[in-house]
Image (cartoon, helix red, strand yellow):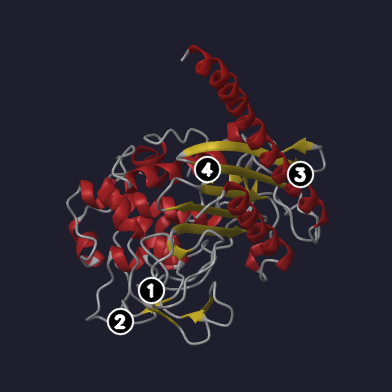
């Protein structure tokens, strides 16, 4: 027996010592690929920050390129980026937590809820205009799944002098009441129901502004404080904030946003008063904590305020049909999906390569959300089982969503997801 152990122990030590080398080699190949493709992408993406999740843990997080090309400041894992529309996923989870806390039903007419609440001072007395479909109420379920029929305009934000001394607004920033009603100085129209609720999937950023107002009424607090209490603090997301404008002490850590022509976004990052839709400022590491919390809750381990029930609820695919001409490409070449792929706040119907499943196929094994603000792009995805995932944040995108994201940027994101999935052996 002793002779057997003498032979086995050295072998085990060799095998165990080899595991880190294999993982380091895999990571080195991936980081080299990222560095190369940042340089060769059309427009030369200034900076990226990436966090990779493996077996319900952050396997690694690293910054690449520059957060400020003019001053040669490198991106680090602590560099802050705008999460853009990824903010909606965190807002959705907070809304479901809030409804559970206050014993509200997600299928209840939100106007009935609003009428029963004392309005927050910034929101004021408000109801969602629905003159064309009065018999079809809008509910939280419909808002979070983009099937409420609410307005579909996009938010460009407001200019703010982050780099002036002292920092201060360039554009006047509206109150929530002004945002909801399209009143000056809001730069968007009033939010209303423009399609029959509960039928068509149509991406609606303003629908999440309605959710924001609803939460502010429920708690009679500012939105950033609500998000801090319900999601950020319980999950240890200490490098995240929904405060808009971003607090002055965090400004030096923010990545400078760039346009595809290589120039910085004039006047720096935009301010998003509609923070539920696109106002989260964070890091990939903090978003990875959020992904892992959902993944653990899906397997029955509550995390912070996210219970197993809530995790399964937001991941449940909701009914709805895409409008003609807007069906999605799928993993099957030439086959398009026309049924909604969304749960509550997440696209829940993608595979490990961020490709959609065709209609009638089992719902995908991964969930994700992408984001696009002036000068920023983001992608967050995770597996529903097994605890794998990735978060990617970039500091380059077109101004005011004035055009589609350049194909080179899209390819960088999708190719990086594919590369991570293959290197990590995702199923």
Q: Which residue is mark 2?
A: 131
Q: Position of residue 245 (x, y in %)?
A: 55, 44
Residue occupying image coordinates x 46% and y 83%: 323
Considering depth in this image, is 185 or 409 the residue closer to the camera? Answer: 409
For the residues labelled 1 and 2, say whether their Cβ atoms are less than 8 Å apart. yes
Q: Which residue is mark 1?
A: 192
Q: Position of residue 318 (x, y in %)?
A: 33, 69
Q: Is residue 414 visible?
A: yes
Alpha carbons under labels 3 and 1: distance apart: 48 Å
Residue occupying image coordinates x 53% and y 14%: 3
Q: Position of residue 337 (x, y in %)?
A: 47, 78
Kindly give the residue lying farthest to the bottom in the view shown.
324
Q: Which residue is mark 3?
A: 32
Alpha carbons under labels 4 and 2: distance apart: 46 Å
Q: Is residue 175 visible?
A: no
In the displayed structure image, the side of residue 376 where residue 116 appears, left or right: left
Compared to residue 272, the image places residue 15 above or below, namely above
Q: Earlier in the sequence, mark 3 or mark 4?
A: 3
Q: Circle 4 — which element?
A: strand
Of the two numbered discs 4 and 2 in the rendering, the one whose residue sits closer to the viewer: 4
Alpha carbons under labels 1 and 2: distance apart: 9 Å
Compared to residue 387, the image places residue 234 above or below, namely above
For the residues labelled 1 and 4, say whether their Cβ atoms are less than 8 Å apart. no
């Amino acid at each position: 027996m002793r002779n057997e152990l003498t032979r086995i122990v050295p072998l085990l030590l060799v095998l165990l010592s080899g595991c880190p080398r294999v993982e380091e080699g895999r990571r080195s190949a991936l980081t080299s690929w990222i560095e190369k493709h940042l340089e060769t992408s059309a427009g030369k993406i200034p900076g990226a920050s990436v966090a990779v999740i493996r077996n319900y843990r952050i396997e690694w997080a690293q910054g690449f390129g520059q957060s400020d090309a003019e001053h040669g400041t490198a991106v680090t894992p602590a560099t802050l980026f705008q999460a853009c529309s990824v903010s909606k996923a965190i807002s959705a989870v907070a809304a479901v937590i809030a409804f559970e806390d206050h014993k509200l039903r997600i299928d209840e007419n939100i106007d009935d809820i609003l009428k029963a609440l004392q309005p927050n001072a910034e929101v004021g007395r408000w109801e969602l205009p629905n003159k064309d479909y009065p018999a079809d109420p809008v509910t939280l379920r419909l808002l979070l799944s983009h099937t409420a029929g609410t307005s579909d305009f996009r938010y460009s934000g407001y200019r703010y002098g982050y780099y002036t001394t002292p920092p201060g607004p360039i554009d006047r920033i509206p109150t929530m009441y002004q945002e909801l009603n399209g009143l000056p100085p809001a730069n968007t129209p009033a939010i209303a129901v423009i399609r029959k609720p509960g039928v068509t999937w149509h991406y609606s950023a303003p629908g999440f502004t309605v959710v924001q107002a609803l939460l502010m009424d429920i708690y009679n607090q500012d939105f950033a404080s609500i998000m801090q209490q319900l999601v950020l603090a319980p999950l240890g997301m200490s490098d995240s904030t929904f405060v808009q404008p971003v607090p002055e002490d965090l400004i030096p850590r923010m990545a400078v946003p760039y346009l595809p022509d290589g120039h910085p976004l004039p006047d720096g990052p935009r301010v998003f008063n509609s923070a539920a839709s696109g106002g989260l400022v964070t890091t990939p590491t903090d978003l990875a904590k959020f992904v892992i919390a959902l993944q653990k809750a899906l397997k029955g381990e509550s995390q912070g305020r996210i219970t197993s029930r809530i995790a399964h609820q937001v991941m449940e695919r909701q009914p709805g049909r895409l409008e003609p001409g807007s069906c999605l490409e799928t993993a099957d070449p030439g086959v398009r999906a026309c049924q909604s792929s969304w749960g509550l706040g997440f696209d829940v119907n993608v595979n490990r390569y961020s490709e959609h499943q065709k209609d009638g196929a089992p719902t995908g094994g991964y969930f994700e959300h992408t984001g696009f603000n002036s000068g920023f792009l983001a992608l967050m995805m995770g597996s529903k089982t097994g605890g794998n995932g990735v978060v990617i944040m970039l500091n380059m995108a077109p101004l005011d969503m004035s055009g589609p994201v350049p194909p080179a940027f899209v390819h960088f994101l999708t190719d990086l997801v594919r590369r991570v999935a293959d290197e990590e052996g995702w199923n």
